[in-house]
Image (cartoon, rainbow, N blue to C red):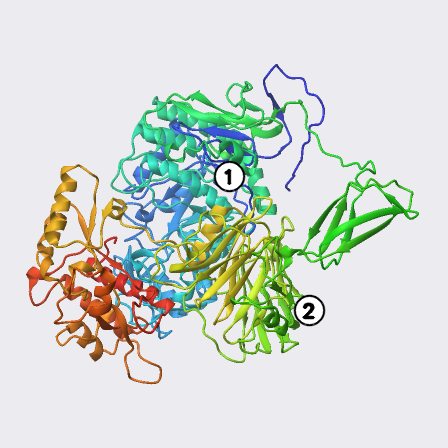
Amino acid sequence: MCVYIYMYICTQILLKADKYISISECTACLTHSSLVYIIQMVWGTEVTHTVSANGATNHFTLNLQLVGLPLLPSYWSLGFQLSRWNYGSLDEVKKVVERNRLIDLPYDAQITDIDYMENRKDFTYDKVLFKDLPTFASYLHGFGKKYIIILDPAISTENLSDGSRYDSYYRGQSKQVWVNESDGITPLIGEVWPGRTVFPDYTNPDCTSWWVEECRLFNETVPYDGIWIDMNEISNFVQGSSNGCAQNDLNYPPFTPSILDKLMFSKTLCMDAVQKWGKHYDVHSLYGYSMAISTTEAIKTVFPGKRSFLISRSTFVGSGKHTGHWLGDNAATWEHIKWAIPGMLEFNLFGIPYIGADICGFFDDTTEELCRRWMQVGAFYPFSRNHNAEGYIPQDPAVFGADSVLVKTSKHYLNIRYTLLPYLYTLFYKAHTQGDTVVRPVLHEKFSLLINLISNMRVVSLFMFQGVDVIQAYIPDAVWYEYETGAKISIRKQWTDLYLPADKMGLHLRGGYIYPTQQPAPTTSESRKNPMGLIIALDDDNKAYGDLFWDDGESTEIKILGVLQEITGLTVTQNNDLQPSLHNITYYPSDKVVHITGLQLELGKSYTLKWTQQASINERFDCYPNQNSTKEKCEQLGCVWEQSPSNPDSPSCYYNSDNAYSVDGVEYSSSGLVANLTLNSTNARANDKYTEPIGTLRLEVKYHSNHMLQFKIYDYQNARYEVPVPLNLPSSPVNTNENLLYEVSVQRKPFGIQVRRKSTGTVIWDSQLPTFTFSDMFIQISTRLASQYIYGFGETEHTMFRRNMSWHTWGMFTRDQAPTYKLNSYGYQPFYMALEEDGNAHGVLLLNSNAMDVTFQPTPALTYRTIGGILDFYMVLGPTPELVVQEYTELIGRPVMPPYWSLGFQLCRYGYRNDSEISQLVEEMKAANIPYDVQYVDIDHMERQLDFTLGARFQGLPALINKIKAEGMRFIIILDPTISGNETDYPTFSRGVEDDVFIKWPNTNDIIYSKVWPFLPNVTVNESLPEQTQIRVNIAHAAFPDFLRNSTVEWWKREILEFYDNPRNNSQSVKFDGLWIVSVEMCLIFGVNVCQARVELQTETAAARVLKGIYNTACL
């Protein structure tokens, strides 16, 4: 039986001056609210921990919404745990257990890594070094402790060391439970810790049955209490498979996101491998998620009716319902003790609150000071484990000596953890039942702190506290008590110095809350038998209280529903007598609701209210977006012409009727909806030059996750261009209706989509507006916005980060255009982030690569207009700005991790005269001691701007590059995707023609030529002429590689490799370190524009493949 008691203090309580009350010997478990890290971390709301840091708190979260209800961990799994990779033998493990028992260290679980196995094979044990492992769990149980094993998803294909059959493999083989090669039949072979391995396909129900049975059988041989699953990203020590990966669009997709090595199968499986849920290309990132589900089933079988222990290295949205997580293979550095804090905060946002980091660091030898500080803060990790790797010194607390400061302070703070375990367990119960976070930033509790702290953040110094014992801490605006003494802190809303000597960290309780406690013991099995207690920390009024709303009749509110236009005037009469009224009118256009307040009406009397309505200028939506609109042209479209001298930027031609589409046939499901859109009037055009609107469209709405949805509008009868950029979407929706952060409704007539944030009711998308039209070469849709705070869309120059909403239109189409106000430039980014009035944030992506513009207006609203493709929107719900970015990059691909050297200063110019000038520049920079890592050359190093050539003035460039690289610098060259066709001896062009790599005119074999940089051959350039004149007179005809073809990628790769390693003259090999690609928008100086927006993407992908070929696994 479980009992949940809610305690509420509402009366004065006698207490010692400025101290909190501690009530011990209580027999009931009582709870309320939470624990805080001033550094950055919170258990719930009240107890603040401060660890030595030369700076303040990085508060960044305002609110929290989780993706699902996480598991409720077993009570014992909240105790402290010890582990390491490669103890060497079971005897050594027992020594660790005994020496930490002898110092009475609070300590609940012992873990062994893969070294307990025979040759690292799952479901085996080393019968020499770990020969007594079958009795080890019983040995630990005698001390009230638990035993946890590790399992990897890599099953050896080899026999056991005595030559006998490895039954786990053969049983899996007979059930055909492995991930297969592209034929769907042959098991994919890779290599992990045990050598040649196959990989269980946990998306296959037969595999889950096999896995459950293997876990059950092994438990009969080697009893254990919990399972740790690792290497499940999935990890593979060879690239893809032992046979490599086939050259196809799955393994080498047209666009490779910014992932490891820019190679889809780096350190993992081939993307064309087959699983039950689909191609590995689609389900790769669900591997750890599916393994956790299968392992949860194993735990249910092995430990029926009990909650056990499960942590997983790889997770996905919703993994928290099945498993906990640790932050992976960190290092024993001060930087990584800092890094753990945002990591734990993030995973609480992700709905995985059972989260921690390897205390004292996994890699590298720790130091006593680092491990001491880490044990102090790690005592309050939700998942608290000390773990490190083979080859490094032991770092369990007792190894530092029973009388060491590290042991004393570790015991002290672990005893506090165990004292507060009833409280921590309650936080997990709240997380499990209602989605609360267990660890959170202070800003979750104190939104107003953002204003106080935003200018005082010192993020860089966070946790950088080696050798520090006095730190600055910010005391939030509340009553706070020192945990150790109970003394009330006299200051608030300011910074203060805290003295934290070697054995002390700052630990504080927030006033106004009650904390359930229990007398600690070395294990939870012992502590749960001890007396319970309470800590009551009173607020300023020495009481807890609630709120009551009471209306005195003075502020009567009237709500009017279904108001289609803004109310601009209101009169109040009684018996035909005009009454004075100081009212306020608020119009909510998304809901079409008006609130009228401040009427000062007397109850019991009758009044008449009359109002007038008029369309606000801000409600105008442009009916004639082209230039040179006139009254005649406007009225021909059935729109209204009315100029506004007071607001000349507003449209003079605007709609006065609904859009012409209506909805029928809506089909709802738990994962979204589908519907048909039907055109009701053929005169619904945005401009008389555009084609007729398409008569029937399809709307699809998909709830991909609790925080992300997609809505897509397209012509289902005729295929249209769709952007071929893969997104990281679940193969099937991962959500629960009760945990969705959003609600979607479809307005039927006129058509519109409305998205509302469930927690606040805020409408964040509302497209039931007159602008919607969908024709072959013109698509337009508008939406109301939740506020004026809009950020994003690019690439264009504008004056502020926040977008100006006063009738501004911005184009998006990649162009070789230097930054100039309002001119579309090099890139194309149709994504925006919006803040809502309550501080929540969301983001919206329109996945469309056709030429587009976006108009912002002060309604607030925005209008998209694009000339092709479909409407394919993705919305992420945050709810914080930082989380919006995280969710967006999770969708589109995480940003590239640049090589370390590329973060250094880089120097470049267009116009170096020769290699001697560059050489002199390098020497002068060195002589001036200016930090300087990278030197470039622009197109001036080429012969007449021809790619893969060296001009006469740059014949010494290869030697110069070798020289500066030997001195520790790097060199980058430029390439343009424009290949001269006016040459008689230019292998790059002739081989390109042979390989058929150039863009051609439709339905012909004729190459498209235009003019970009290469100069004509056999022409003497008069350099005294202005540059543009030189270009006009001497420019050659250039062809453009089609990087969507595999042959082009191979041709491009060959040209780059031969420039890097010149097969004809090795002394002319240009040993560059990186590539700078330009003019991929594409740039055309003279001639026909044949721009393809996706060329840029494909060029970058091709170049990345080449660099990988040159540098193998090096970071570039």
Q: Is residue 436 above or below residue 229?
A: above
Q: Is residue 29 above or below residue 905?
A: above
Marker disc for residue 749: 2
- 359 vs 419, nearest the viewer: 359
Residue at the image point whose x is 45% and y is 50% from the top: 886
Tell whether 348 sits left or right of 896.
right
Q: Quadrant of the C terminus?
A: bottom left
Q: Quadrant of residue 215?
A: bottom left
Q: Earlier in the sequence, mark 2 or mark 1?
A: 1
Point out residue 34 in the picture as x, y percentages from the top left corner.
56, 34
Can residue 311 be seen here? The reply is yes
Task: Give the secondary structure at mark 1.
Answer: loop
- 419 vs 1008, nearest the viewer: 1008
Crowdedness near tag 1: few (<14), some (14–19) or many (≥20) residues, C-alpha within 10 Å: many
Q: Nearer the viewer, mark 2 or mark 1?
A: 2
Amino acid carrying label 2: it is: Lys
Point out residue 504 in the picture as x, y percentages from the top left corner.
42, 23
Q: CA distance from mark 2 to mark 1?
A: 46 Å
Point out residue 219 in the picture as x, y percentages from the top left corner.
43, 52
Crowdedness near tag 2: few (<14), some (14–19) or many (≥20) residues, C-alpha within 10 Å: some
Q: Quadrant of the N terminus?
A: top right
Count of picture labels: 2
Q: Quadrant of residue 1038?
A: bottom left
- 693 vs 282, nearest the viewer: 693
Residue at the image point whose x is 76% and y is 37% from the top: 549
Can residue 82 be seen here? The reply is no
Amino acid carrying label 1: it is: Val
Q: CB of mark 2 within 8 Å of CB of mark 1?
A: no
Q: Residue furthest top?
A: 17
The residue that mark 1 highlights is 439
Tell whether 512 sits left or right of 925.
right
